[in-house]
Image: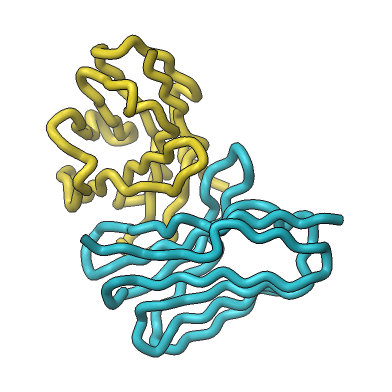
Amino acid sequence: GQQVMQIPQYQHVQEGEDFTTYCNSSTTLSNIQWYKQRPGGHPVFLIQLVKSGEVKKQKRLTFQFGEAKKNSSLHITATQTTDVGTYFCAGITGGFKTIFGAGTRLFVKA
Amino acid sequence: EPEVTQTPSHQVTQMGQEVILRCVPISNHLYFYWYRQILGQKVEFLVSFYNNEISEKSEIFDDQFSVERPDGSNFTLKIRSTKLEDSAMYFCASSGGDRNQPQHFGDGTRLSIL
């Protein structure tokens, strides 16, 4: 079945360092969404990418969607302690199913 | 800001019993979803619901599971004959008039099967 792989599983950074998480789908996606989940919380929508090669920015966060619409990345510049949590990509095909990646848990040391 | 609300926040049930998890989606949303997250693991899609019927379901969503929208506001997930491995956090989500709209998640119900 369709899979969305996400790496790394964990990332420890010093505050101020950059962070990147990568997603790769086994099939072409119609769009991809990114969510953040704080410990003990629920996933919170960050952004959606739809177009091939699309790049979107939200302050220190940069999101990219690959040309083939099979991979995506989230890059955080100069991490802060408030960035702590698990970042999930979620791939959507032409149907109603959303396939989440395994998530990357970000730890930020002050 | 409108929220998806889920009840109860925590449900403890004996193995073999039936449970009903309840969700009130955002009022003008049309697409509804249930997800499961086993502790420390990823969010797993269970089912999507649109226009009063299941639009898609995963391999996890077998005959043990059912969903219902009994009235204009509630969206329920029923799990029959619960098993130990059903212990997880169950999230309800809803999205607006387009299935590609962002999904808004509730706080979840933690289901513990004893």
Report the side of B18 relative to A79 (left or right): left
Q: Percent x, y for residue A38?
A: 63, 47
Quarter of the C terminus of chain A within the rendering: bottom right
Residue B51 can be seen in this image: no
Q: As rendered, which of B3 and A99 lies closer to the eye? A: A99
Q: Percent x, y for residue A6?
A: 46, 64
A53 lies above or below A30: below
Residue at 28 percent of width and 21 percent of height: B83
Q: How many marks are shown on the rendered structure?
A: 0
Specify the quadrant of the image occupied by residue A9.
Answer: bottom right
Specify the quadrant of the image occupied by residue B67.
Answer: top left
Quarter of the N terminus of chain A within the rendering: bottom left
Instruction: Give the residue at the far left of this rendering.
Output: B63
Residue at 36 percent of width and 78 percent of height: A70
Tell me what hue chain B is rendered in. yellow
Specify the quadrant of the image occupied by residue B52.
Answer: top left
Tell me what hue chain A is rendered in. cyan
Q: As rendered, which of A7 and B79 lies closer to the eye? A: A7
Residue A30 can be seen in this image: yes
A19 lies above or below B57: below
Q: Percent x, y for residue A90?
A: 41, 62
The figure's colour scheme reads: by chain
Residue at 36 percent of width and 43 percent of height: B35
Residue at 27 percent of width and 74 percent of height: A27
A103 lies above or below B59: below
Report the side of A7 relative to A62 (left or right): left
Q: Percent x, y for residue A77?
A: 73, 75
Report the side of A46 relative to A58 (left or right): left
